[in-house]
Every structure is written in C-alpha cells, then in structure tokens.
Image: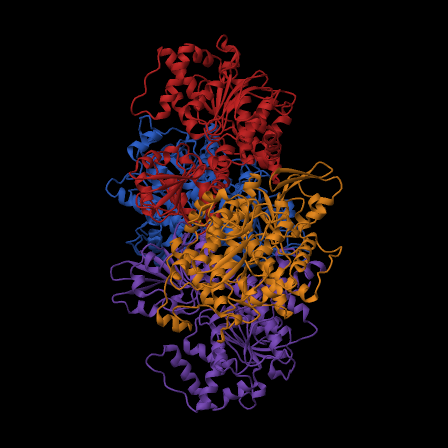
Chain colours: A purple, B blue, C red, D orange
Amino acid sequence: MSFDYKIADISLHEAGRHQIRLAEHEMPGLMALREEYAEELPLAGARIAGSLHMTVQTAVLIETLTALGAEVRWASCNIFSTQDEAAAAVVVGPNGTPEDPQGVPVFAWKNETLEEYWWTATQIFAWPGVDQDPSKGANMILDDGGDATLLVHKGVAFEAAGAVPSATDEDPEEYRIILQTLRDSLAENPQRWTGIAGELKGVTEETTTGVNRLYQLARDERLLFPAINVNDSVTKSKFDNKYGIRHSLPDGIMRATDVLLGGKTAVVCGYGDVGKGTAEALRGQGARVVVTEIDPINALQAAMDGFQVATLDDVVEEGHIFITSTGGKDIISAEQMSRMRDKAIVGNVGHFDNEIDMAGLEKTPGIQKIEIKPQVHEWVFENGKSIIVLSEGRLLNLGNATGHPSFVMSSSFANQTIAQIELFAKSHKSGHSGHDTYQNQVYTLPKVLDEKVARLHLDALGARLSELTKEQADYLGVDVAGPYKPDHYRY
Amino acid sequence: MSFDYKIADISLHEAGRHQIRLAEHEMPGLMALREEYAEELPLAGARIAGSLHMTVQTAVLIETLTALGAEVRWASCNIFSTQDEAAAAVVVGPNGTPEDPQGVPVFAWKNETLEEYWWTATQIFAWPGVDQDPSKGANMILDDGGDATLLVHKGVAFEAAGAVPSATDEDPEEYRIILQTLRDSLAENPQRWTGIAGELKGVTEETTTGVNRLYQLARDERLLFPAINVNDSVTKSKFDNKYGIRHSLPDGIMRATDVLLGGKTAVVCGYGDVGKGTAEALRGQGARVVVTEIDPINALQAAMDGFQVATLDDVVEEGHIFITSTGGKDIISAEQMSRMRDKAIVGNVGHFDNEIDMAGLEKTPGIQKIEIKPQVHEWVFENGKSIIVLSEGRLLNLGNATGHPSFVMSSSFANQTIAQIELFAKSHKSGHSGHDTYQNQVYTLPKVLDEKVARLHLDALGARLSELTKEQADYLGVDVAGPYKPDHYRY
Amino acid sequence: MSFDYKIADISLHEAGRHQIRLAEHEMPGLMALREEYAEELPLAGARIAGSLHMTVQTAVLIETLTALGAEVRWASCNIFSTQDEAAAAVVVGPNGTPEDPQGVPVFAWKNETLEEYWWTATQIFAWPGVDQDPSKGANMILDDGGDATLLVHKGVAFEAAGAVPSATDEDPEEYRIILQTLRDSLAENPQRWTGIAGELKGVTEETTTGVNRLYQLARDERLLFPAINVNDSVTKSKFDNKYGIRHSLPDGIMRATDVLLGGKTAVVCGYGDVGKGTAEALRGQGARVVVTEIDPINALQAAMDGFQVATLDDVVEEGHIFITSTGGKDIISAEQMSRMRDKAIVGNVGHFDNEIDMAGLEKTPGIQKIEIKPQVHEWVFENGKSIIVLSEGRLLNLGNATGHPSFVMSSSFANQTIAQIELFAKSHKSGHSGHDTYQNQVYTLPKVLDEKVARLHLDALGARLSELTKEQADYLGVDVAGPYKPDHYRY
Amino acid sequence: MSFDYKIADISLHEAGRHQIRLAEHEMPGLMALREEYAEELPLAGARIAGSLHMTVQTAVLIETLTALGAEVRWASCNIFSTQDEAAAAVVVGPNGTPEDPQGVPVFAWKNETLEEYWWTATQIFAWPGVDQDPSKGANMILDDGGDATLLVHKGVAFEAAGAVPSATDEDPEEYRIILQTLRDSLAENPQRWTGIAGELKGVTEETTTGVNRLYQLARDERLLFPAINVNDSVTKSKFDNKYGIRHSLPDGIMRATDVLLGGKTAVVCGYGDVGKGTAEALRGQGARVVVTEIDPINALQAAMDGFQVATLDDVVEEGHIFITSTGGKDIISAEQMSRMRDKAIVGNVGHFDNEIDMAGLEKTPGIQKIEIKPQVHEWVFENGKSIIVLSEGRLLNLGNATGHPSFVMSSSFANQTIAQIELFAKSHKSGHSGHDTYQNQVYTLPKVLDEKVARLHLDALGARLSELTKEQADYLGVDVAGPYKPDHYRY
C-alpha cells in the first residue's frame, strides 16, 4: 500500500473521477486559484489535517490544496455525509490506480458509527512518524464544525492533566466516545496531542458552530493557535448558508418524500441566513411559509419579507412541513411533534441534530419507527397518526440530497483555500513578524480577499462587473481595486 | 399464475406498498372518491385498458378504479417512466403475495425497448378470451399520450385495408415498430382490433398531444368512440401542467446534475402552462429566466411576468440551462447545441423527445457520448466542449426524478376517474339515450365536476372555502353550489 | 359653439394634450392601428356613442377612433373617474383652440352627481337632429359597464310599454334616477330610444359586469343588436384585469394613505384575474396576503400560489388591509368592519361599490365620517376605533390613483377598436350577409385578432417573438400566422 | 409672535394635524418611546437643532422629542422635501392656534432656493440669545445628510482662520452659497460657530453620506463632538434603505409618470440596500430588472437573486427605466442618456443629484426641457427623441412621492430618538465619566438597543416573537433578553 487510508470501496474511483470533472466546471473559484498559484505553490510545506464532509466538491478542494503544494489527510465531519465514490477518487488520484493509489489518504465512508467517526478524526493527525517526531505531523487544520480542533484541544488538556475524566450521566453519548478515544490515546502516547498542537500554525473553520467554539476558546485564552473564521466571509455566510440551502433544502425534501411543496404550509424555525434560504426556496415552490424567531430584528425582517411570524405552538397543528434552521437546541419537542398533522414532515438544516428532540421522540410511549427508505423514517404514534422525520434529525440537505451544489461550495472552499494560504504564511508560528502576523486569536479574512472570492465566480455566471473610474473611487473614498465597503457593511 | 403480467421484479412489492400507503395520504382526491363511491361501485362492469406512466401515483389510481368496481390491465406510456416497485405492488395487490398475486395485470418495467413498449401496449387489450369473444375485452381506455388509442385506430384501419403498409424512409424509427407490431397482429387475427374497437365505450385522455390527436380524429370523423378530454379540465391543465412541473422540473435537474440553479441563465422554450411552471420554479431558485415563444399572447404574458423574451439564437451562447416545454418539434437544433456554453444543460418537459434534435446531435461529426449516470449524458463535441442532455431528450421530470408529485396527480387522476365514471355510464355505446349521451366526439368534463375535483383537495391543504349566500348567488346569477364561472372563463 | 359638450374647464386642454402625447407613447397598440388603417378608414360613417372613463388613455382611444374615420360623442361611465384635462383636450382636439374646439363632444367631469351622470349618458345619444331623424344618430355603442346599453334597452322597453314604472322601495337610489331620466325622455319624445335602437349596428363592451348583462339579454332574446364581448379577449381580461390592477392597486393605496404595505397582512377577497393581480402586487411589496374565495378552483389556485386561503371571519381581526375584487356583493359587512383593527384600510377594485357594505356602515349607530382628503375617509366607530375607506367603496384604483396605466389600456382599447371595426362592417344590420355576419348575440373576437393585439405590443417592450417554420406549424396543426391555440385554451 | 419660524402657510396646520394623527398610528416605535419615557423625560434640558426632511413623519419625531422633554428648532435637509402642512402643524402644535402657535420653530417650505436652504440651516442654531451666550444655544444636533454638522465644522474652521475663502471655479454652485452664508455670519459675529460648537454634546446622523463625512472628520481628528451613526443600525440601514425604498420607489415613478412598470426593462445601478429594495419592488411589479455593480460581492448577490448583471453600456439602449442607487457620482452620463430609448425614464434614489449627470444633460447642444408637471421633466434631444427625468435628478421618492412611509420612518426615528437619549446623557461633554462615555468619535448604537427598536414594531404587525428558554440561551451563549448575535453578524 502506497499509503494508509480507509474508505468504503476503492473501485468506485472512476465514477468519482467523472463527477469530480463535472464539479470542477462548477467550481470556478477553486480552478482559478489553481491557475493563479500554479507556479508559486504557496502551500508547499503545508501538511493539512482536513475534517469536512467527504463529498465530490471536497474532492475538488483537496486536489486544489495539493495543486498548491500541500500534503493532506482527510476525514469527514459527519457520519452520513461521505460520498463513497468521491473518497475513492481522491485516494486514487487523477493519475493513480486502485492498485497504485497516488492521491491523498482519506478516512471516511458513508454511514460510520460514532466510534468509527472519532477514530477517523484521529487518523488525520496520524502522519507517519509523528509520534516519534511531531514536526512530521500536520501543521494546519482545515475544519468544519470544529471536531478536529476540539480533539486537539481536549487532547492537550487531558495530557496536561495526565488523565481523561469519566463521562457523567448528563454528558451526551457522543462525549463518552470522545473521552474513550482520548483515553486510549493517552495510554498509547501521553504527549501525542501536546506534540501535535505545538506544530500547528492554525486552523481555518467554516461553520457557525465551529466558529463559536473558537471565539469561546480565544475569550478564555485557551486557543492554542491562530484561527481564521471563514464562516463569516460574506462569500461564505451569505452564499453557502443562504443560496446553498435554497437549492439543497427543496432538493432534500423532494428526494426524500416526493411530496408536493406547493400549497403546503411550511414552518421555518429561525430566519438567519439558512432560514432565509429555506423560506425563499419554499415560497418559490408555492408553499405558504410561516417563520418562528427569537431575535426581534430577524423577526421583523421575516415580516417585512411577507412571511407570517408566529410561535411554533401557534401553527404546530397547521403545518405540513417543519424545518429547523436555528443553530440552537430543542426547537421542536417530541410533544409538539405528537400534535402535528398526520404525515407532517420534520427536518433540520441547522447545525446539530438536537434542534429536533429525537431523543424525546424515541422515548414517546408506544411510538413505532418505520424506515421508508434510508434517511426517511415514519414515526407512528400510539393513536395511529405519524410524522416523517428526515435524516434522523441531522442535516437533511446532506443526508437526503448531496449537500450544497458545487458552485456554492466553490465560494466557501475558495475562502478556505485563501485562508489556508494566509495563515500558513502569516501565522506567528510561521516565524512571520510583520504587523499582519496572526496571533492565537480568531480572525476574519480581509474584505479585499472576500471580494476576490466573489470576483472569481462572476465570469462563470456571465455577470459583467462595472468598474469605478479613479474619480468615482476618490469621490467614494475607496481604491479602484477595492475594498469597497466599510467593515461594518452588512450586504 | 393467477393472471398474466410482465414486470421487472415482483419482490419489490413491499417497498412499493409502503410508497403507495404514503402516496394515498397525498392523493386526497382519489381517496375521497373511494369513500364516496364505496357502495355504489359505478365502475362495476368496466374493463379498463390503461396506458399511463406506471408510477406509485398511478398505483393509487389503479386501486381507486378497482375500488370503484373496475377490472383493469395496465401498461406504461413511456419506456423510462415505470417505477418497478409500484408495478410490483399493483400486481401483488394489498392482500396478495408474490406467489399469489391478487392485484392487477401490469406490463411495464423501467427501461423498455421500443419493441417491448409496443408489445406492452398490445397486452392491455389482450384480455383472456378476447380474440374469441371481443365482449370479453376492454370496454374503456384510460390513456396518456394517445398510444393506446392510436393502436386501436391504426389496427382497425389496417384491418379494413387488409394490410399494413411499409414504413417509408421519412417515418420515424418508432413508427416502423408500430407497423411491425400491427403486421404481426394482422397475421395472428385479421379482425382483432375491429372487434376490440366495437366494444369500447370510450377513452379518457390527459395530455395535450393525445387530445390533439383525438380532436383531429373527431374532425375527420374517424373517431371510433367518445372521448373525454381530461387534459383541459382546469384542475388538470392548470395544476398538473403548471404546478406539477414547478415541482418536478427542478427536482429532475437537481437529481441529475446537482448543479446550482441560482445565478444561472435558464432559457425556457415555450410559455404555456408547462413553461409557466418551469419559469416560476427556476426563478424561485434564483435563476435568471429567458423565455422563447411563438404565440404573441403567451409572449406578452411572459414579458408581463417580468421575463426577458428573446429568440433562442439571441441567447443560445449565454444560457446555462435550456428547457423545452412547447409540445412542438425541432425547438433546439444540433447546430444550436454546438454553440452553447461548455457543460450547458439541455432537457425537455414538453411531450415528445423531438423537441430537442437528438437525432441531429447523434449525427454530429466527431461527437462522443458519455454516460455520467443513467439518464444523464455528456455529449462532447469535436472541439472539446460538451453539453449535458437529460433523459435522452425525453421527459426529464420523469426520467431524472419521479414525475409529478402525488398531490398533483391526485387532481389529474380524480379527473380521470370521474371521466371514466361519466363515460362508462353515459356513452352512446352504453345504451344511454338521454341528452347527456356522449357521441363519437371529444368532450370536456362539466365545470361542476371540475370544481368538485378542486373541492376534494382543499381540506388537505388547510384551505377554508367561503360560501355564497343565496342572495349573493342570485346577484351573480349562479347556483350556490356552482358552477361559478362561464365556460369561457380562463382562471 | 362649434359643437355641444359639457366638461369642467376647457382651459385645461394644454395640460391634457401634454399627457395625451406621453400616453400615445405608451399605447403602441392604438398607434399601430392608426398607422395600419390610415388609408382605409374602416370607421368612416361610424357614429359612436362612447361611455367609458374619460381619462387620458381614453382620449387616445377616442382620437384613434376618429383617426379611423368615426364620429364620436363621449361620456364617462363613472362619476369620479373623469380626468378633467383629458376631457378638455379631447374637446379642443389636437388642432383646435378653446375658442374654436375641433375635437369631439364630451359630457364628463370629475365628481358628477348621479343625476348629472345619467344626463351625460343621454347626451352621447343626442346627436343633432336625431329626434327628427334617427338615422342621424349613433350607429355604434362603445360601452364599459353597460350603462349606455342599459339606457337604450330600458328606453325601448318603457316606450313599448308607454310608461315608465315607479321605483319600489327595494330599488337602489340610482335606479330611481334612471327611471326619472327615462320618464323625462318619454315625455319629450315617446319614440326616442326606439328610433335610436333601430339604427344601432352593435355594441362593444369591456367589463365583466357589462358582458354578464349582455349574455342575460341574449339568453332572454331581448338583445336589440349584436354585441362583442371585448372583456373576454385574452389581451383584455388577462391584461387589464390582472396586470392593470397589479399596477394601479398599490398606486391607489399608496397615494391615498402613504401606509407601508410591507409586513402588513392584506386580505384579498376574490382570486379571479383582478384578485390575482392584487395579490401579486401586495406580495411584491412584502405584504402577507390572505385570500378568500367561494370558487374551489380559484381557491386551489390561491393555495398553490402560496397564499393562505381563509374565510373573512377567520382573519377579519388580523388584517391591516382589505381589498374586495369579486364582482359580487356584500363581501365585507358593516359588522365585520367594526371588528377590524384600528385604522384598517378597506378598498374595492371589483366592479360596484356594493362589494363593501357602505350603506350599512353609514347606518352604524354613533359612527362618524372624517374626510382625510378627497376619496379617503376615516370612519370612527363609537368605541373610538376607526377604519379608512377608500373612494367611498367605489373603484379605488380610479378614485385614488389614475386607473390602469396607458400600456394596459392600449391592449384593452386595441380590442375595443378592432371590435368596433369588426361589428361596424359585419353586423347583420350593416347589410352584410356572409357567414361572418354578427347577429343579435354576444360574440368574442376571433383568436387571431386577439393575437394581433398582443403582437402590436411586443416591440415596445423589446420582446422578440420566435416564428414557427412551416414544418413546425404543420406538426402542430396550426397556421404559421396563427391562431396558435384551441379556443378552450386558458393561457 | 410667540416664537420665530418661517414656513409656507400656517393655515395648513389642520390638514397637517390630521395626517400626523394617522402617521402616529403607523409609527409604533415612536409612540412606544413616548409612553416608556413619559415620566422620566430623558431629554429635559436638551436643545436639539434638527435638519431632516420636514415631513409628516418628521413631525411625529419632533413631537416625540418634545414629549421626552427636549426643546427643538427644525429645518429641512432638502429643498424639495418639505410637506407644508406638516411644517404648519408642527409650528402650531397640538394645542396651539395659528394666532398663538405653541409648537416648535420650523424653517422649511417646499421648493426652497439654495440660498434660502442654507439660511434655514443657520436658523436652527439661532436660538434666542445665543450670540450673547452660547450656552443658550443648541446642545444636540439631529442630522440627515450632515449639512447642519458641516455648517458648524466649516464655521468653526473659518472663524479660526479669521476669513472665509473664495470659491474656486471647480467648486459646485452650492459651495459658493455655503461660503457666502458663512462669510455673512463671520461679519456679524466672528465667534458664532466656535461658541455654538463648544456647547454641542453630539450629533446623531442617519444617512450613509453624512456618516461617511463623520468618519472622515474622526479619522482626521477634526470631529468637534461625539457622533452616533444611526444609519448603520440594522433597523435603520436594512429597513429604511431597503424596505422604505421598496415602497417609495414605485410610488414615486407611478405618481410621476403613470407608466406601467410590468413588462418593462428596468436598469438598477447599484445593488446595496437601496438597490436591493428598488430591484425587489420593480420585479414585484413585473418588470425585468438588470443590475449594474462595481462591487463583486454585491454583483454576485444580484446574480444569485436572479437578476442579469451587466454594465450600463450593455443595456443603455434596451432599458425603459433607469434608477441610480449607488451613493457614487456620474453613474449615468449625458451621452448615455442620449442613447436611451425614446421616453426612457431616469431617476435617482441614491444620495445626491450627481448620480445622474444633470449638468451635462443641460449642456447638451440643442436640448429642450419641458415641464410635464412639477418634478417631472421631458428632455428633448435634437433628434426629437426624449427622456423623462424625475425630480431633476434628486431623490425621486421624496420629490415625486412622499418619501418613505411612516412605519419605516418609525424604525429610523426610534433609532434617532434612542441615540439622542444616549448621547445627551453619556457624551463626554455631559460631564459623564463612566466607561460608556462617548468621545469625539463615531459610534453605532449597542445591538441590544437595535433589537429594542425592532421589538417596538412587531406587535403592530401582528408578528409573534418566540422566547428563548434559559437553557437554550445558555446553549447559544447569549442572554435570554439579547443581544442575540455577534457584532459582525450581517442579517
């Protein structure tokens, strides 16, 4: 074996390669970066531990990172989201064969157990020889949701304490598994994560949840390396979250249920960027959309956009479709699900599966769970009425469809790539000492790089940008080349 | 074998039965008819030859027809559209087993050859003993696209002529197969179709194309039995064509390509009901939509709805997505396809696959066809640019998705069922002689029945209808119970 | 005086002429007809009695009719709708002066009393010398709402009876005035209307209400001359009713109240063409729209378009804006108005002012009416809460704004003009005896003329029509030049 | 005279009072603040110099400020925008009479000259006795566009220099007038503005332009007092700019031209918040919208929202309507206007009238300007083609309609009021010395106050807000009472 990896079936690589080729066409941002940096190879020397849904689009990201000079190891950040053919193609690489894979080590397959999932998370840090010499390990993390970052931080903390604590009764099941994973690690090598952390120049993170964790670590002065918050680039948050969901939300419901969206009453919980995309998609399909919100500004936006704003209890018996998109928890309770219409559809496009109280649903006396097809379950209550839950309450656009489309991911991933380049070059751990040096804090990308990402995508859409004259730019007090807006501008 | 059938795999029946159960919930029109006519059984004695996409929704239709007393034989009206699990479930029936099927004879499977297709068309007329005694055969046709009706009319004509003509060079390939099918039939039984036609009380037809053929036959005084044009019930044409496509068009493109629709330029050829649904769906996904039209009224509607109206040549190099929805032919030529953007997506939701010049495409010198996945093909031109053609130019919403959703089909199929009841009872061939008797002409359903179909679907959506007072009704000159509009009203 | 007329102020003619010049630009249909028929003068010899809102757009219609050779006399069909400067400009004519008016006799001013209104209706038939010689009178009616037609039919009936009956207690106030008008006429000339009716070759009528009256007369075999129902040309009903209202409804509310539409709950009573335009306009402004309907088909359309469908009582306390667009009566009762939110806005864009129970409102104990400005009244209930009623319950788009925009009226009026040409040439009273002859029935325009009207408007919008090849037309069974659709097609 | 003022006609006060009463109902934010602070009177002692469009809505703001204890003097910030009846009502006050006005001194009337305009600007600082004792003068500025702030800063600078410079050839005409105004002032009192500035605790400013000036002053360390940037409160920028324009833009075009928006091609220059509202409004009316942009992020947003993105030259011959909304200058040149379609409509909703090159237009050889009606001019080119320019290139929503509706202004003005309270209490010039003290910098309102403004408006819309449980808030790491989002959140 030329290198280690663990995937479902390497023979799927050809199908994956086909899809990658088509996806490349839809990812003009990444392809433009490959072209721009073909000579310079700004990621030469970078060893990136990547934790992000192992899809066809991610394959294009991975091969962009390697085209820019990086070495990479990869795991998925979700037990369901791996597209097995993409993983196979990445392992084999464009020029390899299943017998002689020349791509990148990947540890991911569709439908992992939680134990397997956390094992794959350790594998992206298991660079050959790293236990003996941490400088052979990863020096960058590319993260989605923060699990890779969490593992390092917890590992370092437990190694400092010399022991891994026991899980308490209140800890979620998943946390027990994390603790066991680190307990095993501690037994094998009591300084593993401390060594790894010492080498890491930084992390780039693209989810709200992961970013929140980073800000908390930074606030507590426990962040071990610089971080770039890619999530809050405009070309990420306003594009991935809003326009990506607008596509993949109806896609997921349609594939899962084939139920007509037109004429139905859809309740969208949360009117942030994801909720806005959800509401727009459902209205575009002729559904009547009702929004629930806790933030008065977002609630007022929903009202001004023409949506009824109500509490969930106001409409729980009226809705045909319920989508959570809050980032919070316990948004829909089991009791509320029991009051819904027969065959109401319930799904989540927020971050974690605890937006819908799946645990409570499972414990409902007399309830029966029928698998209609993978990721589509009918939960039949004692009274004979049932509801349809998508993807077990996890992200339905990933579980029931194929996630965000390539074009949207091109925007998010161009941000990731540019952020990796920035941090790899300018982290204070890179020996850099200019006033640009990134410290152990959380940063967002400079606006002009955000604008660059947008610029890379316009041509492919046939959009023609106007240009400021020098005189107009002076009048506005900006540079002809941007950035064009003050930092507080909201788009 | 309790009865004859030919399907892909009878073991799929359980999966099909699950889906049928869920579909029933989304087909309130059909379920309401089952309830309304549970005692009366208005189709007792009807022997229906059905030719309509053999999907899960059609399964609910078939079982509604049998619940109303009919005997049924079924084929699909499209070589790609059969859902094999639905066919299996219908054959087995709700109470049968694969070993002892108690449902309905079905002749349909996904991906038939054209020869197989026309053989299945003959089988829905091959009732046991019919060759010996035509009165044992079908007495009703339920048609979609008119192929079953065509077969009978051609059969009768050739039997009258005593011979089946040879195909000419200009005849499409498919016509040769039809001729051969009837040539074989003539050899077996020179009066088969004449006998069958003599027993048929009528046909109900639900497509624009099929209806046009019927009007031509009626105009030429060659129609052999009464016909009800279900296509032009408001609750069919304005619902199936418009709202059904609004759902299934993006569903098909998304499943086929995973390409982001937002920001793309989509060219919609034809702004009839299907085109209107297509344009609305694409705009709802954030695409820029350009419409082409030959009818100035529809063109003006498109303009008033805010769409750019152009000729195909105006925008053929600009579009990312091209959808035909005209019912005409040669809408997109091979030459035009060769001028499109690299990886442009081309698909059809009109009626026949000749809206896109697939034959011309195939003959393009140096062209190469790559199957991305079933029903999704990349056609690579000599210069390296390629386009993606969906479902080989046939209906993409059927080929790449699962067709219209159940709720929409409930409306169309409630019209079909009500039309079957009408015609079976009141065809002049039913011995009926009142002034309602249907002659060998094409009829539309009385408006009050059209309104009835709508009424059957409101509750399920939570829509609450207002009621006229007697005084208000008198003022309007209508009956409190409807119909409410003059016949020429356009909705 | 070169001719008789009665208008508000002839000195307004210059302002009117300016507006007419601008309106001509927005009425490409009428201008194209002037050009097409400049030589032929198909209306030479026509003497048209016109009863239609005396607006700037109507001025362009009138001057088109005269450009085609007609003589014309005009009154408004609504007591509030006259634009005084338009009336003045039409009277003066493009080449006349206030001292030497050379235009057309007009009898209309803003804010007529009902007595004045019915007097103006008599004046369009008062051609010089007609009492002596009916052949000097009108030979065509161009009607909107049917009042001119009603006057002739009632006049003839009462002359036949030799007396005008007394109004009963149940007759509306307006009917008393009509009776008195005709009683006076009978005293002056007992055969006036009989004489006039004998000369009339026909009427063209453009409203639903007027057309309904005509169909009733035809059904009762009491129609005295042929009629063309212009209202049901697609380019009238689907354009004027829907797209016209989409513009003029928000225009009227905005001018009247300056109240933000975004975020408000708007209740639209009736989802016909007018209701569809209303709902689309309000949604386009960010209002949440709730629809009430009595017709299950229209109700289902509203639901499929994403609107909540409820009864008025369901939402009467919730709505901020209530618009009636039904054509029926007693849609909103005084009792319901008393239950509305403080400062709720109530308006009508249906036909008559009895959609809103203004009489009941006026009789509410303790109610107080405050004029905010002309056509905007606050009705204060005893409990201090108030509602805002627009245009006294009459058409708010006319009373509070300037009615439909010119472009929409160009479409309606091109239909009127073409219908006048048709009927003037081919009425059975024209001595015509071909198989096209129009009898004393109600007709719609041939579809190809409807398409012609659409065609005349495309260029001005920059819409580029595609053309059928002969082969494509044959395939569809239509002529290359149209008509393209079967008569029952709904658009 | 109880106090000094200069307005058009005090007899208009009754009409104004009616309108104020209705506007109060639509300004729930301001009315809630009156109620909340009825006892506390947080603005007691504040003397506010206000410069903001003197409309009915501003009247409600002024009377809110006085209800909270302030003394106020007012001028408009635009020569066209005063509603004379509002000015009259504010002067008279709710309890005064024209003979005994008890309201607030106002210096504003519709259609001021530029000289008059700058005179009114001086009057809001001309508190009785101020020249003798600056502490009797204004201690707060409430500004819109920054003219009042500019006057003070220029005045102080020239007084320091001891002379007012002459205007150069390149200075715009308006600057000459400002200089002359200050030259006259210097002659009268050489320390007037220095005295005034010394007393000012701060300014609250609500426009992008005004805010940009403030940031420049702060950057150059020349800002003379603290400033709160009200413009960038979410409930201002996203509401006033976007939802306000969505209403008032079509309102302005409709009132000005009565031209059908449906079917027309509208070119929107700039896709910031104002452009977004413009584009949404025009699409909602059925126009085809094309967007021009210089910022790639906004351009990508426009594309993703389904709009064609082009340069102005790409579509200048195609558009029917052109709207500038950039905040920049020279967006539409005279040469481009000469290439537009006959009767194209050109208008501006950006900030200054230099977005459209009116000066260049005027200088076009052979051009002729015809006033269609006030604020609507036809400019006829030598070749006979013409364009329609609204409001002379100034803000059309103010010039051709009545500006933003009350509800939107309630949101903006609630921000203004809260900002006045903040600054009056906590300016470092207020003697306050806590860590909240505002220095001579530009601040935005704390997010929780922004959320408060939103909250004050939800009830009036019938929107029902959900509430976080303590547990949910902890999970999100926020307080149950807010603020809910990080500062960089974009909404």
Residue B156 x, y percent position in the rendering = 44, 33
Compared with C262, A323 (above or below) is below
Asked which quadrant contains residue D41, the reply is: bottom left
Residue ID at (42%, 65%)? A326
Q: Position of residue D324 (x, y in %)?
A: 62, 51
Q: Is residue D477 above or below residue C227?
A: below
Question: Can the viewer see residue B440?
Answer: yes
Most foreground residue, D162 or D287: D162
Q: Residue C354, percent across and down?
A: 36, 33
**x and y percent of residue C208 in the render?**
43, 30
Residue occupying image coordinates x 67% and y 64%: D159
Q: Quadrant of residue B442?
A: top left
Residue nearest the observer in this picture, A374 or A485: A485
Is C116 on the left or on the right of B390, as rendered?
left
- In which quadrant of the rendered image does the C terminus of chain B lie? top left
State whether residue B154 appears in this view. Answer: no
Q: Give the residue at x 44% y 87%.
A: A158
How many marks can you see?
0
Nearest the camera: A213 or B4? A213
In front of the other: B407 or C150: C150
* Residue found farthest to the top: C132
